[in-house]
Image: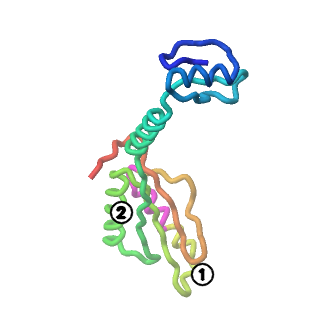
Amino acid sequence: MIGADGAQLGVMSAREALAAAEAAGLDLVKIAPQAKPPVCKILDYGKYRFEQQKKDKEAKKNQKVVDIKEVRLSLNIDTNDFNTKLNQATKFLAAGHKVKASIRFRGREMAHTSLGADVLKDFAKALPNATSDKPPVLEGRTMTILFTPVAGKPAVNK
């Protein structure tokens, strides 16, 4: 049992603890119910809940949301288009986002999925500040690869 001022009141029965809390005009709250014997504290429960909500809100405000941005390539992409997509992906990575590069195969292009894998591998080699955990994956008619920013590079917030 812990008092309202934080002092140890010792081990006592539940009735005695409840009577002590009522005498102080506060609530009896189980802090560690799984302990033997359970640890209880005398405090203002409404104020306690308000403080917990405040802590939760502060923690939520400080967490960073990582978005996944997508760059779509084609099987027979030209050099300038490739460089444009590369620059866009570099900007996304510099901002701290993950980048998903994808190629959609249409019609007879499904017979040449190895060419699509080559395009994505070239894209991976050309990205300066990104790492990819897995090789390109074919899901249905779309081949994708996911890039994450390198941890050593500082993220620029825009």
The image's mark for residue 111 is 1
Q: Nearer the viewer, residue 46 or 70?
A: 46
86 relative to 52, above or below = below
> Badge 2, how many Cα within 10 Å: few under 14, some, many 20+?
many
Q: Residue at x 37, y 50 (%)?
A: 96
Q: Secondary structure at mark 1?
A: helix
View extreme (right): residue: 36
View extreme (left): residue: 158
Q: Residue at x 50, y 20 (%)?
A: 4
Percent across and percent down for residue 73 are: 43, 72
Percent across and percent down for residue 28 are: 58, 28
Q: Find the magenta span and give its range.
A: 119-129
Percent across and percent down for residue 47 are: 44, 33
What's under tag 2, amino acid-wise?
Leu
As measured in the structure, the alpha-carbon distance from the residue carrying label 1 to the one carrying label 2 is: 26 Å
Residue under label 2: 86
In the picture provided, is 156 more to the left or to the right than 68? left
The image's mark for residue 40 is none
Q: Quadrant of residue 112?
A: bottom right
Q: Residue at x 50, y 25 (%)?
A: 25
